Image: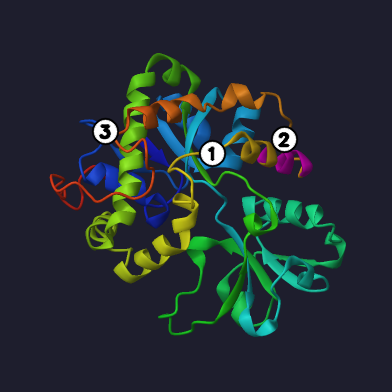
Amino acid sequence: MLLIDGEIGPRFAGEIVALRNGLMPDHFDVRAEPNASDFVATVARRGAIGVTTGSRFLTAAWRGVPVTAFAASLLETPTVILTREASGLRRPSDLIGKTIGYRKGSEGDLIVDALLTQLGLPRSRIDKLNGADSVEALRSGRVDAIITSIDRLPQPSDPDFIRTNRMAPQDFAIHVPGLVYFTSTQVLQEHRADVQAILEALIDGWKFVYADYARSVPLIVGSDPGRLRDERVRFDLEQQRDLVLPTGGRIGDYDDSRWRTLRDVLIFAKVGEETVPLPQSVDYQLLRDAYRRSREEASATVVAPRESLEQADSTFGFIK
């Protein structure tokens, strides 16, 4: 079983497509757990595979939850700072003396604080308004900027659309893992080949997503047709494309430098102490083995979908 830390949607498109196209092992389910109070511990207790934010994973590992990360779905954080285009606020230094809407304790809050500190900007000269992190708060002028996620951007077809400027942490040399795949350390040790097979299916799922929207978007929308809309799914997929398929990179890949930066961000924010060294909580070899076995070892870019894949029924495999 693969547990998702959030609602089914474009952020988890690779998982959805891998399941619904029959790439996963038989009797394998994907379950959304958007309200789990301790998601990482829940995954470990159930002997499942999970996908969650890098910060949530790492702080749980520091608390003693016996888990190991082995790949990433979003290689960079989806956190962004948005400002109104007409405001002229385009760089973090422009935010001095301004008001930012945010959600206290969120990953975005922690990462942006680290970004401001790294750039040598006085955080005391930036006002922050907790809970005012919606596009509406930005539109109304209640705040000058918001800390949000790339899947919450205003869409041009929205009736109340506003043009925005976007600042991403990675544009200013803050690189941390976005969403990561993990399981209990025991499961990885005792069922490594099975976990690798699921990882390979996830990689193929993400390749399929971006190979042909005409085929992948209906699969994603069909997983929750009452909530998801075709146009919005396409829009969100495009916004996160570079986080999944970086130029010159490989799907699922992460490196030690991203994890070290995330560790430093969390320690700086005083949300935890590194009681477990990174080499004990992060595995790099499984992904290397998966690509070694892959027919696309020479190229980790998008490939055409296999014609033999058939679309499954819209409700197959999902437990909401």
Q: Which circle's residue, 1 or 3, is located before the other in the chain?
A: 3
Magenta-span inclusion, residue 266: yes
Question: Which one is in front in this view, the residue at disc 1 or the one at disc 3?
Answer: 1
Q: Is residue 122 above or below residue 281?
A: below
Residue at x 32%, y 32% (from the top left corner): 294
For the residues labelled 3 and 2, say whether their Cβ atoms are less than 8 Å apart: no
For the residues labelled 2 and 1, say whether their Cβ atoms are less than 8 Å apart: no
Q: 206 or 16, which lies in front?
A: 206
Q: Which residues are magenta?
A: 262-268
In the picture of the structure, the residue carrying the numbered disc 1 is 254
Is residue 231 toward the left or the right of residue 134 in the image?
Answer: left
In the picture of the structure, the residue carrying the numbered disc 2 is 272
- Residue closest to the far top: 190
Residue 249 spot, x, y in % from top left:
48, 45
Residue 253 spot, x, y in % from top left:
49, 39
Disc 2 to disc 1, C-alpha distance: 22 Å
**Magenta residues, dominant SS class:** helix
Q: Is residue 196 above or below residue 208?
A: above
Disc 1 to disc 3, C-alpha distance: 25 Å
Type of residue at label 2?
Answer: Gly
Residue 207 visible somewhere in the drawing: yes
Q: Secondary structure at mark 2?
A: loop
In the picture of the structure, the residue carrying the numbered disc 3 is 28
